[in-house]
């Protein structure tokens, strides 16, 4: 068989159902082999969109998403999405065609050293130099990408190797390492620290969701009577409606939830990675005792010196600790939670127009079921979503906060809808981020995928303006113009609505969901609320 055919068989063996990407000259043998495979190839309109789709697929499922490009510019177009997946710890396999090995040693058309280019943004980066090694390379790529901490594996596939005829080979058996049980001595150390703490606080990271340990986290919180804050990327790990939930932490400014950290003496970090919310923001003077519970050891950081590290299966660790630790009688944050909950609903009836961020998120939450999925792009709206969107289930509010790349929401929503056709999927994006990958609307329409794209329109790079105003009290080069988003949607065969008043918003969102196609909702936003929030948090008085 041809090496390209063996390669596709190895992908099938890994359970790959979809590949996102764009065909090119140097990957034509793989593209041809896919015609005889059950793997569905999703032709995208840009390689960055393909990488973001694979990224979000990996984030939602825990299985490696696969994207494919040709050499040179096709491969470089993957980089932003690949870097985002790798830093957000989403498993992904990126594959690029390459020129023949007979011309890699010299200057040649579209030739780049892709292995070294992808190495800094991947866990494993390699080139297929012989067809015979394909089963080993593919198996290693998936194993490395999917095991903790997950990330990217990159495979460079030269065109002459893809054409080779190789001896019949079978794909290798799929095997995944099982997280070990945490050592008993560490369990006892953690239990002692938690039992003796005056005001312990749990900070849950995305690793809790990856480990499917959310139920055990909630049980641990309830039994030990300890409140839970989540990072942006772990929203929904404990339902916001749960009495022990303090919502998401991650704003660099002081916030109500920061009051909990200010009063706490022990922080129990469960499935937390410092890229999600850097410890210098919540452990400035290194006075907090840290209990690290995760499958992998803690990162070295001067503000993250752990008192004890419980390394192993997260659910097993939590279960073992709560069997011997003493539950807490005094609840740290009852008043704090009440303050946070009240703030969420404070703008429910706000009639201001353009619409305030708080009102947009309140109405969006009312329009969606608990299991529906919101994909946040990056911009000023992301900070509001992270702070105020009430997630009730894990993986129902997807926020990129490691690499934090603009342009992820629309392709991410497409990937989510492919996997969860029964759920409502909403891409929440600014007008700037939307235009970065809006071409993928055609991909969604071609595949008859119903997604809602909620655009917060302000004709500015709003988050950058927010920072400029905080530091210099004047904006610099942040304005632009937009197309007519309604006509833009209609040009793809999609639908579009513009929100004309605050009263329109909820009804428009419900109509967009009912339309069962791609729908753009253009919602003018009042970002003067950004600076009001900055001033409010600057004058914050802790309610505990």
Image (cartoon, rainbow, N blue to C red):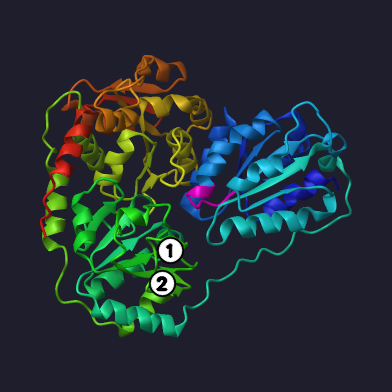
In this rendering, position of residue 510 left or right of residue 377: left
Residue at image position (64%, 47%) is 119
State the quadrant of the C terminus: bottom left
525 relative to 54, above or below = above
| Residue 87 sits inside the magenta stretch | yes
How far across and how far down the image is residue 203, in percent?
Answer: 32, 62
In this rendering, position of residue 23 left or right of residue 329: right
Q: Please state which of residues 267 and 359 is positioned toward the viewer in this rendering.
A: 267
Other residues around mark 2 within 10 Å, as few (<14) / some (14–19) / many (≥20): many
How far across and how far down the image is residue 288, in percent?
Answer: 29, 67
Mark number displayed over residue 221: none
Other residues around mark 1 within 10 Å, as few (<14) / some (14–19) / many (≥20): some
Can you identify the residue that label 2 sits on? 315
Q: Contact (CB < 8 A) between labels 1 and 2?
A: yes
Indicate the secondary structure of the residue bearing disc 2. Answer: helix
How far across and how far down the image is residue 374, in percent?
Answer: 36, 42
Mark number displayed over residue 212: 1
Residue 455, visible in the rendered structure: no
- Give the distance between the C-alpha atoms of the residues marked 1 and 2, in whole angstroms: 8 Å
Residue at image position (27%, 57%) is 239
Magenta span: 86-92
Residue 111, visible in the rendered structure: yes
332 relative to 234, above or below = below
């Amino acid at each position: 068989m041809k090496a390209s055919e063996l390669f596709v068989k190895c992908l099938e063996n890994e359970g790959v159902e979809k590949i996102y990407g764009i065909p090119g000259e140097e990957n034509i043998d793989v593209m041809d082999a896919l015609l005889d495979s059950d793997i569905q190839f999703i032709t995208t309109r840009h390689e960055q969109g393909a990488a973001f789709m694979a990224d979000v697929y990996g984030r939602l499922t825990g299985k490696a998403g696969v994207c494919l490009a040709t050499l040179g510019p096709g491969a470089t177009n993957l980089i932003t999405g690949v870097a985002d997946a790798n830093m957000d710890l989403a498993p992904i396999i990126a594959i690029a065609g390459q020129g023949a090995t007979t011309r890699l040693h010299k200057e040649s058309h579209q030739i780049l050293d892709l292995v070294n280019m992808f190495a800094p943004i991947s866990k494993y980066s390699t080139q297929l130099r012989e067809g015979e090694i394909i089963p080993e390379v593919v198996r290693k790529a998936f194993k490395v990408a999917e095991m903790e901490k997950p990330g990217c594996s990159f495979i460079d596939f030269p065109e002459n190797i893809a054409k080779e005829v190789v001896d019949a080979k079978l794909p290798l058996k799929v095997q995944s390492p099982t997280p070990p049980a945490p050592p008993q001595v560490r369990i006892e150390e953690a239990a002692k620290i938690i039992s003796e703490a005056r005001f312990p606080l749990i900070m849950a990271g995305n690793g809790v969701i990856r480990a499917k340990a959310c139920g055990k986290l909630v049980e641990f919180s309830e039994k030990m009577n300890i409140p839970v804050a989540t990072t942006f990327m772990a929203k929904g790990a404990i339902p916001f409606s749960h009495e022990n939930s303090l919502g998401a932490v991650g704003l660099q400014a002081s916030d109500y939830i920061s009051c909990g950290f200010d009063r706490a003496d022990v922080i129990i970090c469960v499935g937390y990675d410092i890229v999600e919310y850097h410890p210098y923001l919540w452990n400035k003077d290194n006075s907090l005792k840290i209990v690290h519970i995760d499958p992998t050891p803690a990162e070295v950081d001067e503000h993250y010196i752990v008192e004890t590290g419980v390394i192993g299966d997260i659910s097993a660790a939590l279960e073992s600790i709560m069997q011997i630790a003493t539950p807490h009688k005094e609840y740290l944050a009852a008043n704090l939670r009440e303050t946070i909950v009240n703030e969420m609903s404070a703008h429910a009836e706000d009639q201001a127009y353009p619409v305030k961020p708080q009102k947009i998120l309140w109405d969006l939450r009312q329009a969606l079921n608990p299991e529906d999925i919101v994909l946040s792009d990056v911009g000023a709206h992301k900070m509001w979503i992270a702070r105020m969107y009430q997630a009730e289930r894990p993986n129902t509010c997807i926020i990129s906060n490691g690499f934090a790349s603009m342009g992820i929401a629309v392709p991410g929503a497409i990937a989510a809808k492919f996997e969860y056709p029964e759920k409502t999927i909403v891409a929440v994006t600014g007008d700037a981020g939307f235009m970065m990958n809006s071409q993928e609307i055609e991909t969604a329409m071609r595949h008859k995928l119903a997604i809602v794209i909620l655009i917060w329109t302000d004709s500015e790079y709003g988050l950058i303006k927010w920072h400029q105003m905080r530091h210099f009290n004047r904006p610099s080069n942040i304005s632009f113009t937009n197309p007519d988003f309604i006509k833009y949607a209609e040009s793809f065969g999609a639908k579009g609505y513009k929100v004309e008043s605050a009263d329109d918003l909820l009804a428009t969102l419900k109509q967009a969901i009912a339309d069962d196609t791609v729908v753009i909702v253009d919602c003018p936003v009042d970002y003067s609320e950004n600076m009001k929030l900055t001033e409010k948090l600057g004058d914050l008085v802790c309610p505990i």
